[in-house]
């Protein structure tokens, strides 16, 4: 008997829903429906659904700011804190009596969302572009810019330095020196893989500046090799990306690399 009653209950609610849709303006129903679907779901699931609806990617090093609405980051901090607390409990840490770990879950959540992985959740810093008035077309090097990131594999810190070489064309739009640091920080404040991070940064600079060439060298300490794993304190990773003129012209590449060695 109860199984027969259930479908009966379902149909009227469906009818009500369609009535609401037909009464409201053509654009609003999707919003109303999604709000109803969101009710009671963790915020991360709500955001994830928005991303999936757009078929966008949300890997550790992707920026998902476009899918987060004002005020939601605070909610995300609370959700992460709750789950971090569960991790501490599973690690059998007494967060009640141990005053040092009492608010650790909240601190870690804030650190992840608002600081070290913030580059996933906030929009790209605005880059004021200046026309290349003096028609500069000489090699320009910015750096070292300090890198603070974390590996996507272990969420262990990656600390290092980066140098950016730009060969602008006479038509290039230039960006202020501080903007190179801002953009770098935005890309690095995500769980990253060094090789992918430098490529992403090079792509962005190429798109923004439209130079004849871009070169990036990154030199970093990976704590997942120093703190854990092989525990080799001196292991470093250096990698580079060469684009355009830096790829084609060995003299330019040499000039860039020799200038770095002097630092
Ligand atoms: Zn790692």
Image (spheres, rainbow, N blue to C red):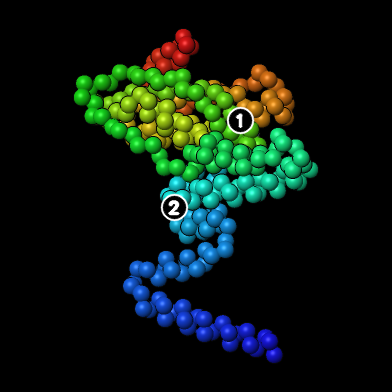
Q: Earlier in the sequence, mark 2 or mark 1?
A: 2
In this view, which residue lies farthest toward the left? 133
Instruction: Read off the residue under disc 2.
Output: 69
The residue sitting at the top extreme is: 262
Front residue (pair 185, 39): 39
Pick the quarter of the image with the N terminus.
bottom right
Q: Quadrant of residue 184?
A: top left
* Furthest-right residue in this view: 92
Percent across and percent down for residue 180 are 39, 27
Q: Quadrant of residue 102?
A: top right
The mark found on residue 157 in the picture is 1
Foreground residue among 163 and 120: 120
Q: Is residue 33 left or right of residue 111?
A: left
Residue 32 lies, with reference to residue 140, above or below; the image says below
Residue 245, image x and y in percent? 36, 25
Location of residue 202 with respect to 145 vertically, above or below = below
In the displayed structure, 78 sits above or below 174; it is below
Where disc 2 sits, the SS reads loop
Q: Local crowd at mark 1 within 10 Å, few (<14), some, or many (≥20)?
A: many
- Please give the name of the residue rendered at 53% of the width and 51% of the height, measured from the top-left corner: 75
Disc 1 is placed on an element classified as strand
Q: Residues within 10 Å of mark 2 (few under 14, many from 20)?
A: few
Residue 168 appears left or right of 153 = left
Give the percent coordinates (x, y) of residue 78: 58, 49
Question: Which dot, 2 or 1, sits closer to the camera?
Answer: 2
Q: Residue at x 73, y 26 (%)?
A: 230
Distance between the alpha carbons at the discs numbered 2 and 1: 29 Å
Who's the residue at 27% across and 26% down the image?
Answer: 169
Residue at (33, 72) in percent of width and height = 25
């Amino acid at each position: 008997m109860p199984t027969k009653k259930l479908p009966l209950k379902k149909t009227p609610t469906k009818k009500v829903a369609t009535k609401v849709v037909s009464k409201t303006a053509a654009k609003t129903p999707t919003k109303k429906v999604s709000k109803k679907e969101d009710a009671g779901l963790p915020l991360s699931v709500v955001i994830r659904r928005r991303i999936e609806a757009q078929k966008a990617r949300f890997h550790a090093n992707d920026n998902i700011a476009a899918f987060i609405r004002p005020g939601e980051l605070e909610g995300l901090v609370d959700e992460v804190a709750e789950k971090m607390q569960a991790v501490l409990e599973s690690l059998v840490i007494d967060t009640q009596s141990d005053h040092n770990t009492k608010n650790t879950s909240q601190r870690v959540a804030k650190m992840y969302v608002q600081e070290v992985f913030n580059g996933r959740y906030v929009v790209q810093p605005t880059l004021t572009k200046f026309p290349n008035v003096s028609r500069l077309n000489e090699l320009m090097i910015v750096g070292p810019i300090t890198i603070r990131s974390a590996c996507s594999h272990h969420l262990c810190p990656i600390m290092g330095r980066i140098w950016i070489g730009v060969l602008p064309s006479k038509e290039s739009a230039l960006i202020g020196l501080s903007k190179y640091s801002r953009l770098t920080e935005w890309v690095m404040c995500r769980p990253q893989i060094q090789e992918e991070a430098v490529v992403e940064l090079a792509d962005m600079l190429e798109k923004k500046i439209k130079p004849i060439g871009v070169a990036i060298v990154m030199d970093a300490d990976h704590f997942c090799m120093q703190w854990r794993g092989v525990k080799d304190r001196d292991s470093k990773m250096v990698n580079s990306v060469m684009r355009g003129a830096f790829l084609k012209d060995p003299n330019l590449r040499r000039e860039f690399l020799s200038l770095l060695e002097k630092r």
